[in-house]
Amino acid sequence: MSSILNKKFEFINHSSFCVSINDLSLLVDPWISGSVFNCSWDLLSPTNPRSIKTIDKSKYVWFSHEHPDHFNPKNIIDFLKGKTFLFQKTKDKRVVNFLKNISSNVYELDSNKDFHINDKFSISVIPFQDIDSFCLIKVDGITILNLNDCDIKSEDELLKIKNYSGSIDILMGQFSYAIGKTNKNQSHLRKILANEILNNLSKTISFFKPKYFIPFASFCFFSRFDNFYLNDSINNIDSTIKMLKSLNPETKFLCFYPGDIWDFHSEWDNTLSIEKYLYDYNKIIPSNCFGEKKIDFQTLLKASINFIKITKDKNNLFKFYHFFNSKFYNIYFKLTDVNIILYFDFNNGLKKIDNINNNNQFCELRSNSLLQLFSSGYGYDALTIGGRFECDKNGMKALNKIFKFQTKNYQNEYYKFSSIIPRLLKKLFKYSRVNSNR
């Protein structure tokens, strides 16, 4: 009886929650405050001050992956110094090395190996796709499967996950889109994407048949003037629960607002939490980019030249790919904050031009976003997830071709002669994204 009284689940915000038993707590993916993805997203609702105390008391912290709405360097420095950090094993050790600078207790977790917090409380982690992972938390006989952002695409992947999880009591997953690859006039594409996410999520719930499902990891919004339109088709929590509940009547759906606490067994009334979220949805407004620095052309040119050098140096198959895709290895950029047009190719980097022909592949964005695109390993991810850009169909193809080297290199994959056979084998045998080889 005492173990029941001392177990609790506290929802922190977005994809973050805290599981406790007695005086031991595990904090997951804390995004507590601030904008992420190059000032593209903000939290839908404020973090409850009470949860800051919970965060302060939590000894263990697990991060699912490196995206800043899960692994937020500023929040880690501000709120989490000295904690015991848990993270999946990766080749680059980028996250682990960052954490070791602020804590002497950092554990790299082997795939599917239990890390015991005590004899009734453990977590195991399984890598997924390129950088993501999901976890199983077991607390006093209760099993929680946290899928967070894992984009499950097939029943085969569900089966592989279930081989790790077995029967579960609580399932947690993302319920709305988190990508910005559509233009202002493409709301129909966003509606299709939103519906696909709910349909896939319903299949996942139906497959696992959990006693409880907790929708989370979508309590944020596209928050700037240049991407605010992306909110027009998001799945809000009210309609999400109604739809999923109608298709999965045997599962109980739990909606938690930041600061809500649940004891794992009492009945939970979603009414108040949903009302709070609906109020928050209705009051979101775009924020301006005051204070966002305008980047001069020489800085952008230098970044583009350096980007070309790094791309070619790290990928000795670059010429091979360029030969077969040369049409898409150039693009026009219209910089909306400084009102100039630039042309990029892999020979000269960026150069100023006067106008864009209607037949040219192009992308519209701000100069700060372009700088990050060229200078950061996760620049392309930040741009496409954050959505602070617009481009035509060929422009999107060009962005994919030009920046795929940078993106894959950041994930420790390189386009080299030595990697041809492993890459072919991976495609030929369709290696599973579950427990993927880092």
Image (spheres, rainbow, N blue to C red):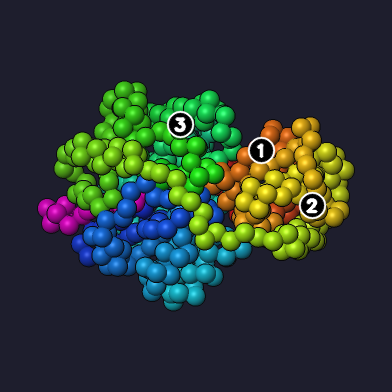
Which amino acid type corresponds to the residue marked 3 in the rendered image? Ser
The stretch of residues the image draws in magenta is 1-14
Type of the residue with mark 1? Cys
Which of the numbered marks, if any, corresponds to residue 391?
1
Q: Tell me which label, 1 or 3, sits earlier in the chain.
A: 3
Of callouts 3 and 2, which one flags the residue occurring earlier in the amino acid sequence?
3
Residue 352 numbered tag: 2
Residue 186 vs residue 160, the one in the foreground: 186
Where the C terminus falls, by quadrant?
Answer: bottom right
Magenta span includes 12: yes
Residue 281 numbered mark, or none: none
Image height of 355 relative to 313, above or below? above
Residue 397's spot in the image, x, y percent? 72, 38
Q: Position of residue 221 (x, y in %)?
A: 43, 44
Q: Is residue 108 left or right of residue 405?
A: left
The extreme left residue here reads 1
Tag 3's secondary structure? helix
> Which residue in the protein does label 3 denote?
233
Q: CA distance from mark 2 to mark 1?
A: 18 Å
Tell us which disc is closer to us: 2 or 1. Answer: 2
Residue 14 visible in the shown view: yes
Q: Is residue 15 above or below residue 190?
A: below
Q: Residue at x 79, y 45 (%)?
A: 354
Residue occupying image coordinates x 75% and y 37%: 361
Q: Is residue 148 left or right of residue 179?
A: left
